[in-house]
Amino acid sequence: MAKKRKKKGWVGRFVVILFFIGIIVSLSLLFRKEIVNAFRPWLEKFNLVEERKEIVLYFSDSDGEYLIGEKRKIAKRGEVIEEAKEMINELIKGPKGKLIPTLPSRTKFLGLKVNEKGVAIINFSQALTKEHPGGSSAEILTAYSIVNSLTQNFPQIKQVQILIEGKPVETIAGHLSLKKPVASNPNLIKRR
């Protein structure tokens, strides 16, 4: 009889311990952000947390006339090309708020180089042109969402040359010449 009580007591304690572990895990998942922020200085000291960099991506306003900035955080890598690649992938994902995407959703980012003159040569899949909705305003906003996002976030980048499948493209939808590298156009940016 005494052995059965000991066994039941041990099982009961084990269940209680599992219950408390479950509560701790659940709370840590719910408050993960707060916990990480509280211990961030210590975690960064031992390189356990990735440092983040705030960038601004430019998407279309609801009228399709201007670009509006949306803040986003990317991994801080210390290298312009690596950070710019992550930024372009975020641009392709589209806005998180009420803004309108400027690149077709099936667009694939294929590569990026920055030459000594500060020209970013960026390569996209054919979806950028083939699935573009067309129209001069939409084309201008597509091109300048790419150009302004790169040049405004990375001062080393002065101009952008857009390629499709590794080849220079004359235009995305027939209205804006992209034969030469394009410089930023801050006049298209609408401040909120």
Image (spheres, rainbow, N blue to C red):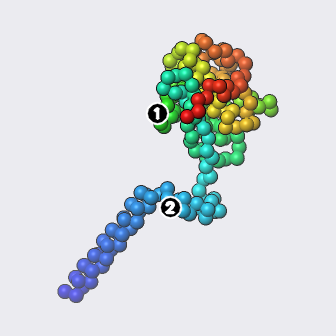
Image quarter for residue 1? bottom left
Residue at position x 31%, y 73% in the image = 16
Image quarter for residue 188? top right
Q: Position of residue 46 (x, y in %)?
A: 64, 62
Q: Residue furthest bottom?
A: 2
Q: Residue 125 — which label?
A: none
Residue mark closest to the camera, 2 vs 1: 1
Numbered disc 1: secondary structure? loop
What's the CA distance linking mark 2 and mark 1? 30 Å
Task: Judge by depth and name the residue closer to the eye, 158 or 169.
Answer: 158
Amino acid type, callout 1: Lys
Amino acid type, callout 2: Ile
Image quarter for residue 177? top right
Is 90 left or right of 12, judged from the image as shown?
Answer: right
Is 117 left or right of 160, judged from the image as shown?
Answer: right
Q: Quadrant of the C terminus?
A: top right
Task: Judge by depth and name the residue closer to the eye, 67 or 73.
Answer: 67
Residue indicated by mark 2: 35
Q: Position of residue 149 (x, y in %)?
A: 63, 33
Residue indicated by mark 1: 98
- Label 2 neighbourhood size at 10 Å, few (<14), some (14-19), many (20+)? few
Labels 2 and 1: the sequence-earlier one: 2
Q: Residue furthest right?
A: 116
Q: Residue furthest left?
A: 1
